[in-house]
């Protein structure tokens, strides 16, 4: 449910873009990001820091897009958010000895520290790749191509990379007792 909640602004952006234009879609993006903050406030829950950061970036770049009637600003927003993710992963790890991937997934996964470090770096590189790819698509293709890439392409890339990460981590995950006993039984039979 939480993942769907985060994608609501993107879905509304795409729907409004399909019906009207980039400027109305950008305005809807600003409004839905603000409504997400209102949602947390109404529930009397602390607003996550990332929601404040996303809202600020969306409001600034979206506002500039609407004010100047220039889609360049909203196109840069995607790159800036991806670069912020990459920088946060690297800086927190290198300067604060805080592995954000471990903090985020540590309760669900038990991995050696060197694997956490590789996972953290791989996601930082992935976000950097997405930032650069967004710039290429945004400024090499028509606006509609960029919108489809932003909504579907980046989402698909994120999904594929997450699945790839899970598959790569699978060999490092501790096996449960049943699996271990099955493996030892197979070794005894051979």
Image (cartoon, helix red, strand yellow):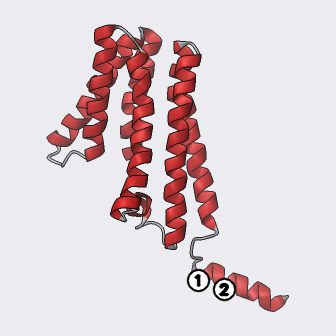
Q: Residue at x 57, y 78 (%)?
A: 176
Image coordinates for residue 80, horizontal then vertical, percent: 40, 33
Q: How many marks?
A: 2
Q: Is the residue 158 above or below the residue 34 in the image?
A: below
Left/right of residue 76 with respect to residue 153 in the rendered view: left
Residue of label 2: 181
Q: Residue at x 57, y 71 (%)?
A: 173
Residue 17 in which image quadrant? top left
Residue of label 1: 177
Image coordinates for residue 167, horizontal then vertical, percent: 63, 58
Q: Is the residue 1 above or below the residue 105 in the image?
A: above
Left/right of residue 49 with respect to residue 124 in the rendered view: left
Answer whether residue 106 is visible to the viewer in this image.
yes
**Residue neighbourhood size for the residue with mark 2, other residues' Cα within 10 Å, grouped as few (<14), some (14–19), many (≥20):** few
Image coordinates for residue 160, horizontal then vertical, percent: 60, 44
> Which residue is outermost to the bottom?
188
Left/right of residue 117 with respect to residue 168 in the rendered view: left
Disc 1 versus disc 2: distance between alpha carbons? 6 Å
Q: Are marks 1 and 2 in contact (CB under 8 Å)?
A: yes
């Amino acid at each position: 449910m939480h993942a769907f909640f985060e994608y609501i602004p993107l879905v509304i952006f795409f729907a409004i873009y399909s019906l009207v234009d980039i400027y109305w879609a950008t305005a809807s993006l600003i409004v839905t990001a603000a409504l997400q903050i209102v949602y947390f406030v109404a529930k009397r829950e602390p607003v996550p820091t990332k929601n404040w950061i996303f809202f600020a970036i969306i409001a600034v770049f979206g506002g500039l897009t609407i004010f100047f009637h220039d889609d360049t600003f909203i196109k840069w927003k995607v790159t800036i958010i991806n670069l912020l993710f990459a920088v946060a992963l690297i800086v927190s790890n290198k300067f604060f000895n805080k592995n954000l991937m471990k903090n985020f997934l540590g309760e669900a996964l038990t991995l050696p520290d060197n694997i956490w470090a590789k996972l953290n770096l791989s996601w930082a590189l992935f976000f950097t790749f997405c930032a650069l790819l967004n710039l290429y698509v945004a400024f090499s293709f028509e606006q509609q191509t960029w919108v489809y890439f932003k909504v579907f392409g980046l989402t698909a890339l994120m999904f594929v990379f997450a699945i790839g990460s899970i598959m790569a981590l699978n060999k490092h995950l501790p096996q449960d007792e049943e699996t271990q006993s099955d493996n030892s039984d197979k070794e005894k039979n051979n």
